[in-house]
């Protein structure tokens, strides 16, 4: 049996994941909370998280964070 989430429920899941991921950034990179939010909100990972079609909002914070870590690791300064 599959239950459908309302848009509000999906957004709540995304918001909760974002809080967890920002916390990981604070801990791992010693960023301020505002810096962590800025890094997250300007990332491709965040764009994917916001896209319902990816289903990332169903995943664990650690799983989604692994995408962000990879993105940051492979980022180039231009």
Image: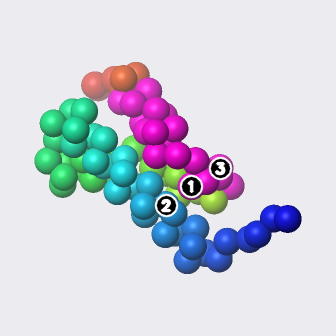
Indicate which disc residue 14 carries: 2
Q: How far apart in space, not on screen, are marks 3 and 1 (Cα)?
A: 8 Å
Q: Position of residue 22 (x, y in %)?
A: 31, 49
- Prevailing secondary structure class for the magenta stretch in the rendered image: helix
Q: Secondary structure at mark 2?
A: helix
Q: How far apart in space, not on screen, are marks 1 and 2 (Cα)?
A: 5 Å
Residue hosting label 3: 54
Going from the N terminus, do you reach mark 1 or mark 2 first? 2
**Is the Cβ of the residue at disc 1 closer than 8 Å to that at disc 2?**
yes
In the image, taking residue 41 as reference, residue 57 lies left or right, namely right
- In the rendered image, the quadrant that contains the N terminus is bottom right
Residue at (21, 42) in percent of width and height: 26
Residue at (46, 39) in percent of width and height: 62
Check if residue 57 falls in the magenta segment.
yes
Going from the N terminus, do you reach mark 3 or mark 2 first? 2
Q: Residues within 10 Å of mark 3 (few under 14, many from 20)?
A: few
Q: How far apart in space, not on screen, are marks 3 and 2 (Cα)?
A: 12 Å
Snapshot quadrant of residue 78: top left
Residue 69 lies, with reference to residue 37, above or below; the image says above
- Residue nearest the viewer, comparing 62 with 50: 62
In the image, taking residue 11 as reference, residue 23 lies left or right, namely left
**Is the Cβ of the residue at disc 3 closer than 8 Å to that at disc 1?**
no
In the image, taking residue 2 as reference, residue 65 lies left or right, namely left
Which marked residue is nearer to the observer: mark 3 or mark 2? 2
Check if residue 58 falls in the magenta segment.
yes
Q: Would residue 39 be seen by someone viewing this image from the given angle?
A: no
Count of numbered circles on the image: 3
Q: Residues within 10 Å of mark 2 (few under 14, many from 20)?
A: many
Residue hosting label 1: 57
Residue at (61, 53) in percent of width and height: 58
Q: Secondary structure at mark 1?
A: helix
What are the residue bounds of the magenta stretch? 53-72
């Amino acid at each position: 049996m599959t239950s459908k989430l309302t848009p509000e429920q999906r957004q709540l899941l995304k918001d909760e994941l974002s809080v967890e991921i920002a916390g990981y950034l604070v801990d791992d990179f010693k960023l301020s909370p505002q810096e962590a939010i800025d890094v997250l909100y300007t990332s491709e990972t965040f764009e994917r998280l916001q896209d319902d079609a990816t289903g990332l909002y169903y995943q664990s914070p650690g799983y989604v964070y692994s995408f962000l870590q990879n993105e940051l690791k492979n980022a180039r300064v231009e």
